Amino acid sequence: LRDMQWSRDPGAVRRVYLIGNGSAYTGPVSLEDVLETYAGRDISVSAIYVAPEKPRNRDEASYRKIAEKTGGRFFKTVPATGTGRPFRYEERFIANMNSALSSTMMYYTRDAKQRKKYTVMTDQHMLQAGAEAFCARLYYRTTTPYMTAAATYDLVSYYLLYNKFPDRINFEFLFAEEDLFSRQAVLDQVRRKALARLRLSDEISYLFTSVRPLDSPADANRLCGFVLATHGSR
């Protein structure tokens, strides 16, 4: 809305596409607050609701409402059926490393519960896609681009990137999630998990680059076989 150079031609079509499979009202920005601004600038929002296995009428209605309020169109679709094979026993080594990495995350935003849920769901979907896709994602999770994106909702990523804590932290969620009872205890836990994250990231990066540097996602897929063959039986 602010950074794009929108056409001033009165005959131009100005449209945004919103695509998702959960509630449309998660994240730091309330969509309700910006819809009138979009409509006022003659920018419509077409909403595409990707129905999960167990769709929720309330979530679908939120996408429909957004489209209607801005003069956009509403679409409903379903994801393609996965064709991936289940993990073999030795591939659990990679899954366990991913679980260890996930255990270092501390969700600190207002929608922390949903953020955690979506991360777990993504893990499950990647498992269904097969070992190669899961390995590629595991390696990606150790990179700076991933951590930069995760810092918007993960306190450990934020601390590692900026060496400080954000101004607003959902301590109520963290108290329950981490079984802690004070703000100082939460901050101490962040520092402990940050050290654990660094160790895990180094180990994972070493596994995937011990043959040669990765130049593309395809390289990560090929090296996944090497990682499983040399380390999967541990």
Image (cartoon, helix red, strand yellow):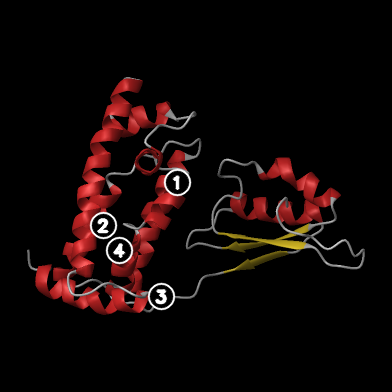
Q: Is residue 70 depicted above or below 225 in this figure?
A: above
Mark 3 secondary-structure assignment? loop
Name the residue type under label 4.
Answer: Tyr
- Disc 1 versus disc 2: distance between alpha carbons? 17 Å
- Disc 2 versus disc 3: distance between alpha carbons? 21 Å
Label 2–label 3 contact, CB within 8 A: no
Q: Which residue is mark 3?
A: 82
What residue occupies the far left of the structure in this picture?
234
Label 3–label 4 contact, CB within 8 A: no
84 sits to left or right of 24: left
- Front residue of this view, candidates 178 and 82: 178
Rendered location of residue 208, percent (x, y) = 23, 68
Name the residue type under label 3.
Answer: Gly
Q: Which residue is mark 1?
A: 115
Label 4 CA crowd tier, 10 Å (few <14, some 14–19, many 20+): many
Name the mark nearer the viewer: 2 or 3. 2
Rendered location of residue 56, percent (x, y) = 56, 53
At x 82%, y 51%, the residue is: 39
Q: Which residue is mark 4?
A: 139
Q: Which mark is residue 216?
A: none
Q: Which residue is mark 2?
A: 98
Rendered location of residue 99, percent (x, y) = 25, 53
The quarter in which the C terminus is drawn is: bottom left
1 sits to left or right of 129: right
Name the residue type under label 1.
Answer: Arg
